[in-house]
Image: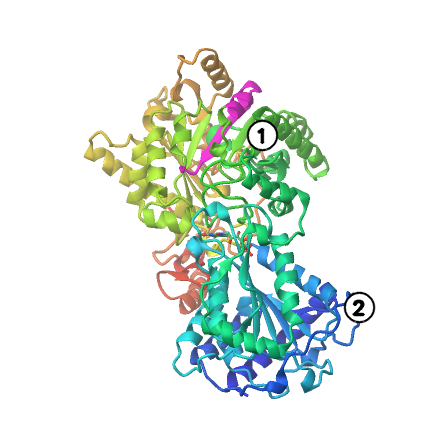
Amino acid sequence: MSSSHSHRQSSFLTTTAVSLTAIVAATGVAWYWQKIKNQESKEVKTAAKKRPITTKRETDTSNRQVPIREIQTTNDDTNNNAITEDSARGRILAPNTVTIVHGSVTGTCSKLAQDLVEALKNEIHLDRTIQMGALEEWDWWDELLNYDDDGTSVNKSGASSQQEKLPVLLVLLPTHHGGSWPPTATCLESALQDLQNDWRIEKSPLKNKLQVAVMGMGCSDYGDDSVGKPAKEAFVTFKKLGAHVFGKKVRVGDDATGNQDRVLQAWLHHDILPGLIVDDDQDGEDDDKENANSSEPDVVDMEDMGTVMESSQQENEDSVKSSKPREMVTATQAKALKKEGYKLIGTHSAVKLCRWTKHQLRGRGGCYKHTFYGITSYQCMEATPSLACANKCVFCWRHHKNPVGKEWKWKTDDPYFIVDEAVKTHVQMIKETKGIPGVNMERWREAHTVRHCALSLVGEPIMYPRINELLGDLHKRHISSFLVTNGQHPKAIESLIPVTQLYVSVDAPTPESLVAIDRPLFSDAWERLKESLSLLKDKGQRTVARLTVVKGWNSDEVEGYAKLIALGKVSLIEIKGVTFCGKSDASNLNMSNTPWHHEVVELCRTLKMELDRLRERGGPDAPPEYDLACEHKHSVSVLLARVDQFAVDGPDGQRVWKTWINYPKFQELSARHVEDPSFTFSVEDYTAETPAWALFGSEEEGFDPTDTRHRKKQKYPKYTQFDERGIPTHDHNNQPLTEDERQQLKAIMDEKIKQVGCGSTVTQLKGGEKLVEDASLMFRGQVIVM
Ligand SMILES: Cc1cc2nc3c(=O)[nH]c(=O)nc-3n(C[C@H](O)[C@H](O)[C@H](O)COP(=O)(O)O)c2cc1C
Ligand code: SF4
């Protein structure tokens, strides 16, 4: 037995107890792998690097598959074939095993894998071990090459050697950017490549050792023929390596139509089950012929995908073929979105109760838009008329359960219906907050009247073809409109009616970082963003460039941001630290990517300097003057505002900021514009004075003093001053620390430096995550460095 193999077993055994409890409870028959702990997988990787080739298994004809017994449906969890802990070896090439693996990132393939376990459990009277897990849980080189059938790997089902069946591997693979393998599956991708290319390995190392079936997932809305590419590649490579593949084609599910359940059924009934009952002898002969000319397999098209499906999906798919547009959100997407708290409206819209709405209802402070612009957060409705968008941003809240598309091609709901339903649903959610401890009843009653709408929830609101009617209806109801677009639809910006405040998200300062961060569907995404920004300067009303700072991703190259902002001469620049809302399936972010407030402040200062530099250079593209106007430390946000539009001289010569909005005035002006489209109005016509507590540098740090602050317990106290290394010198009351205290803190920092080194390091982790580590910042999370 190879050393890596024996290590593999011991790793597994340390985690088996936990896995089995959860798994056996969940499925009864199937057992699953639990993720091997980091340390263990690191060791497995080290072992894999050595890439030992320990066994060259002889072709063993006694190890042939025998036909599966008559298929019976059984739910008998106590069946003799259930696995016991000590037999749990989990090797892929162990006889009598069916291993289901997936490379799921956003959960679709893992769900399909679970469904497959259930289906197999119900379809066949098991005398095989079924195991299921994520691809990353196996060391593929070791699994496919170094399996030594010394008897320890066989399950205790009592199967004699004559009854041994070839192992079966069922692979579920999503498609990623441009047809690449998802980061969760590159372990298999590289092992397959290495197995093909390593000269030490016999030509068909998997011949008579493994049977494989592959199903892909993708999304045809990407519109670039990438759908199912990794699955096709896996299929072809397994075949080249001599594995017997089930089915002649790769079946691929499509997120855009939500047909994956149906494709799974077709895969199971047309490829897997018939494959499982094929006589092994006949099997071997076919293999020889097939593998001799293994070529690119076809992707099954929709007509071939079996007959098992829900009627709504049928309608969806039928409408693709007919001229009738299909509904945007598939049943699976709807389920995932609902699980995340979205209330769906019609076929493409949603509302969700914002956490700040609840916060302010409880007197715990409003959001940064309350601080910067005076909205009442508890009267604000967060909504979108389009759950789809043309990006897959790394920091997206949607966790990538949303539909994508370059342009609108779906059924279009009536805008008045959307507004009506959105308001009703929002008010219903407000009603449900009555029982939350601490709700201010006066605010709660006021909250039944929606005053603001943030069209920024998820998706791309501007894609909705009837957006102007929707905005018109909001304004008619005296609801202000804050509309956020990702700058991929410049034409829609051009034709947009005046909104209270129009945002373009500027997520990256260069074309390359835009692709890395926004992962856009449009190949000319950068040009689109630039065009959108340029169009802002002619809009007349308040325009905003919104920067979401993701440390390690887009916090450098400030000059690039300045140049982009100069294109639009926007009224305001909002800079906000990314919020980390738990590990997102498809996002590669972690806590270290969340900047501290003082870092965002520093970035604002640098941006202002860059803008000043461009302004001093002069010329038609020179930006106007900006300055730091407001901050909301609670949400790590800072506002830069145009001095010519928002700053006036006070009675005693001091600067007075007017970043707040006179909402009734906006409604009045907008109504006049509707009556008479030749009537125009501009930013200065509906400003209002910013209160002192909301100003940058105020003692309140942007927190409305009428509310009560609830601070989370911090790991370290709120130090106020630091030495040049970042070691605190003064406590939260600005009193000097004693020498002893400073030495203790120094020792803690030295320890951290030992771990992470000096300076700031950005480490790109496996899977693309970027980890930022900087010991000098460890005590400074809570202060603004002036
Ligand atoms: C970051 C990301 C990039 C994607 N890129 C593509 C693509 O280029 N082509 C495609 O057909 N599907 C693409 N998809 C769609 C996925 O293949 C599809 O949503 C699949 O169902 C995801 O499976 P999973 O939920 O198991 O990860 C992408 C999905 C994500 C999250
Ligand atoms: S503006 Fe946004 S963050 Fe603020 S209350 Fe409305 S939806 Fe919530």
Q: Against 496, is 528 above or below? A: below
| CA neighbours of label 2 inside 10 A, class few (<14), some (14 to 19), many (20+) | few
Q: Quadrant of the N terminus?
A: bottom right
**For this rendering, which residue is in front, 739 or 753?**
753
Q: CA distance from mark 2 to mark 1?
A: 48 Å
N-terminal-most mark, 2 or 1: 2
Res. 680 visible in picture: yes
Residue type for callout 2: Asp
Mark 2, secondary structure of its residue: loop
Circle on res. 749: none
**Residue at screen point 41% across, 29% down:** 493
The answer to which quarter of the image holds residue 296 is: bottom left
| CA neighbours of label 1 inside 10 A, class few (<14), some (14 to 19), many (20+) | some
The answer to which quarter of the image holds residue 30 is: bottom right
**For this rendering, which residue is in front, 700 or 702?**
702
In the image, the segment drawn in magenta is: 469-488
Tell me: 589 left or right of 419.
left
Residue 438 spot, x, y in % from top left? 68, 37
**For this rendering, which residue is in front, 446 or 390?**
390
Judging by the rendered image, the residue that carries numbered circle 2 is 76
Magenta stretch encompasses residue 476:
yes
Tell me: 129 left or right of 242.
right
**Residue at screen point 73% across, 68% down:** 124
Residue type for callout 1: Asp
Contact, mark 2 vs mark 1 (Cβ under 8 Å): no
Residue 586 spot, x, y in % from top left? 51, 54
Residue 550 spot, x, y in % from top left? 42, 49
Tell me: 533 left or right of 693.
left
**Residue at screen point 45% across, 29% down:** 692
Judging by the rendered image, the residue that carries numbered circle 1 is 413
Residue 127 spot, x, y in % from top left? 72, 75
